[in-house]
Image (cartoon, grey):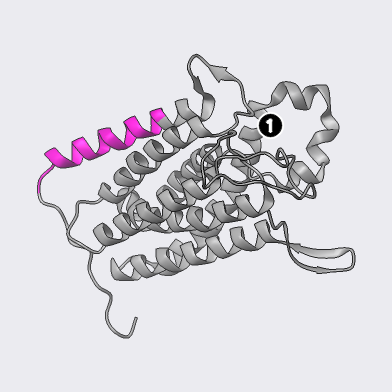
Amino acid sequence: MYPKLIEFGSFYIPTYGVLVALGFLVGLFVTTRLARRARMPSEQIANLAIYCAIAGIAGAKLFMFLFDFRDYLRDPGQIFTLETLQAAGVFHGGFIVALLFALWFMRKHALPGLATMDVFAPGVAIGQAIGRIGCFAAGCCWGRECSLPWGVRFRSDFAAPVPLGKTLHPVQLYESAADLLIFLVLYAQATRRHPAGQIIGMYLVLYSAARFIIEFFRVHEQALVGPFSLTQWIALALFALGAALLVYLRRAPSPTRPERAPAHA
């Protein structure tokens, strides 16, 4: 765990915040690059990315409060603690809220829905890959105990209340690696001939499957609903949505090729 990237006396810059910001900037670069390649308005795409980031943060925190509603109801003061501020929240909650906002924004500005989501999907994946390293540095979203040679032990009690001195699954790094692989697959496909909607469909399927599996190795801070956590149920729903979209596109005619922007663009 390395929660403080730079420290001067009582002032410090949190590693988690820096890596999340870096993930956003890298994701934004990838998204605007793909938007220019597809001859889409990169300025509107960049604005949408910024608004979605804000909506995503709000949604992740909102779902975290909803999932742990009883804990916060018993002790409302937890809402204003450093631990809550540093917590990443529920990613799927942030994704759903950001998606709903994006649908409204795209409709208002007459952006092609599926094509726009396609240029966003690889950027979201690489942003997650970097952000999860921040989770590892902060000690949040920790894994179950294990006896594996690559298990990790956290020793700093500064940030998240991760169990100290116990060997745990480095689930943050599992997800980071999965997200990086998903990014490479999506980016490669985004630069090839594909029907609009295929990239976001692949993202929903691949990320949801990875997250569903990784959740088995995480400590669940939320109540189980039947055999699975709420996050896993959301992952299954998004997996089904992505699979349905891919099946629909497979039956649709004439895929389109993303156009390269002129050299001066």
Q: In which quarter of the image is residue 140?
A: top right
For the point 61% across and 50% down, the residue is 135
Magenta-highlighted residues: 236-253
Left or right of residue 244: residue 143: right
Task: Check the picture and name the quadrant holding the C terminus.
Answer: bottom left
Q: Identity of the amino acid at label 1? A: Phe
For the point 80% across and 46% down, the residue is 82
Taking depth in this image into account, of 117 and 26 the one nearest to the observer is 26
Q: In which quarter of the image is residue 252?
A: top left
For the point 71% across and 38% down, the residue is 163
Residue 109 seen in the current view: no
Q: How many labels does the image show?
A: 1
The x and y percentages for residue 123 are: 43, 59
Q: Tag 1's secondary structure?
A: helix
| Magenta stretch: includes residue 241 | yes
| Magenta stretch: includes residue 138 | no
Taking depth in this image into account, of 147 and 116 the one nearest to the observer is 147
Left or right of residue 105: residue 81: right
The x and y percentages for residue 116 are: 35, 55
The x and y percentages for residue 237 are: 40, 28
Magenta stretch secondary structure, dominant = helix
Q: In which quarter of the image is residue 245?
A: top left
Residue beneath disc 1 = 65
